[in-house]
Image: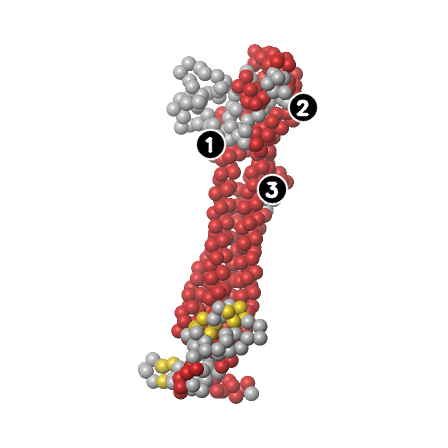
Amino acid sequence: MPSGGSRGCPPVLVSERSRQCTTFVLILISLLLCQMGLALLGLSFYVRPYLQQHHIVTGQSVDSDLFPYGLIAASVATLVSSCMSVMSGVSARQRRRSGRRVAVKFGYAYLLIEFITVIYLLSLGIVFLLQVDVFEEAYQRGFTRVMWEYMQVQVKKEYVDRVQQDFACCGSQGYSDWFVVDWYPRQLYQQRYKVAANQRNQMAKKVFLAKDKYPNSSALIESFSIGAYGTEAHYLQVVMAMDYEFKSGEFLAALLHVKSEVAFAEVPHSCCNPTAATWCHQMYATFPWYNYEPAKRLGVHHVGCTYKVKAFLSSTVAMLVAVLFCTMGVKCILMLLYRYVQTSMANALEAGRHLSPALGYLMPLPGAGGDTYADEDSAPGGDSEQQPLLSSDDGSETETAGTTDDDETEETEDQ
């Protein structure tokens, strides 16, 4: 510890060997971070097409360019700061006074860029985490609404089938969502399922019997009449009920009642589970057939696509955020190490012996002064001043009294 006050805190005595070792480690890690910057750039090209394929569902609610462009900016910032870190480390390893002076001055620019990069990586990680919740809600609402145009819009049909097959899911929150969504063409529905159409009318007429049980949902049950099939009023009633399921995490009692009573219960072929022990029952999946128990031997995927897509996106974003935060943490460590090297070099240069041990610190103390060296013998004019600082490879002394011929020439030119 210093015999007097330190110029900064917390003070640490840094020898020349420690400075050389620290800068070598700094250069090595910075080169590895350059590879990390290239990896972030590669991830940005992977994330963008993945988010854009869901744009048909999320629409303008989610900024699909935030993730890729954010990663590109993070990649550029990581590469620039890492390159400056390498340059700072190489500069600090020079043994000439002029090189050390340049290293000290260049270090301020490097630390500033590194600090800005760390703040950006932290902010980007937080924004990514917040966007996951936004994507989840927008995706649930969007997927539910796309289901209604399954048979009307070919592009949306292809998207729903692709998602249900790729993610092994069915419906928005479960396969029973298809039972209450009027995705089948109305004319074909009436022609092929006349009995189901009549049952829908009977169920809607009995709404007065359900008022006591579902006092706030009579309009929902009444909207399931065949006359309201495919109308905007029915669409709004059902999507509101399904949105409630998503937000509350619970099934709306009236909607659950309708799902179990609706006569036409069919799911698209893309909901079939190829690994099921039995054949795929696309129709009347809620009704028990001979030797068929839906709860135990369901032939279709039972998990909703909202949960599957959200889980995949959450894991992907968690991986990206972990990479960003790890990169940020490593850069913080490099900043601390280089700061000690920089201030130690500055103190050694100020004392006139740039290759001697000197105190380094992180934060300067205003108006503070004190010893630069660990003890009085290390200071200029002490007993160790007469000792050589470096030895050549053949064992002869190459520097005494803290200066070299090159340094004396540089000092004369400076004067």
Q: Position of residue 408 (x, y in %)?
A: 48, 87
In this picture, is 55 found above or below 238? below
Looking at the image, is mark 1 or mark 2 earlier in the sequence? 1
In this picture, is 111 found above or below 400? above
- Quick check: marks 1 and 2 in contact, CB under 8 Å? no
- Quick check: marks 3 and 1 in contact, CB under 8 Å? no
Residue 412 can be seen, yes or no: yes
Relative depth, front residue between 103 and 51: 103
Is 380 on the left or on the right of 199, as rendered? Answer: left
Numbered mark located on residue 236 in the image: none
Residue 358 can be seen, yes or no: no
Numbered mark located on residue 62 in the image: 3
Numbered mark located on residue 233 in the image: 2
Judging from the image, what secondary structure is the residue with disc 1 in? loop
- Quadrant location, the N terminus: bottom left
Judging from the image, what secondary structure is the residue with disc 3 in? loop
Looking at the image, is mark 3 or mark 2 earlier in the sequence? 3
Question: Which residue is disc 1 drawn over?
Answer: 168
Q: Amino acid at mark 3?
A: Val
Q: Residue at x 53, y 42 (%)?
A: 50
Relative depth, front residue between 246 and 54: 246
Farthest residue, direction left = 394
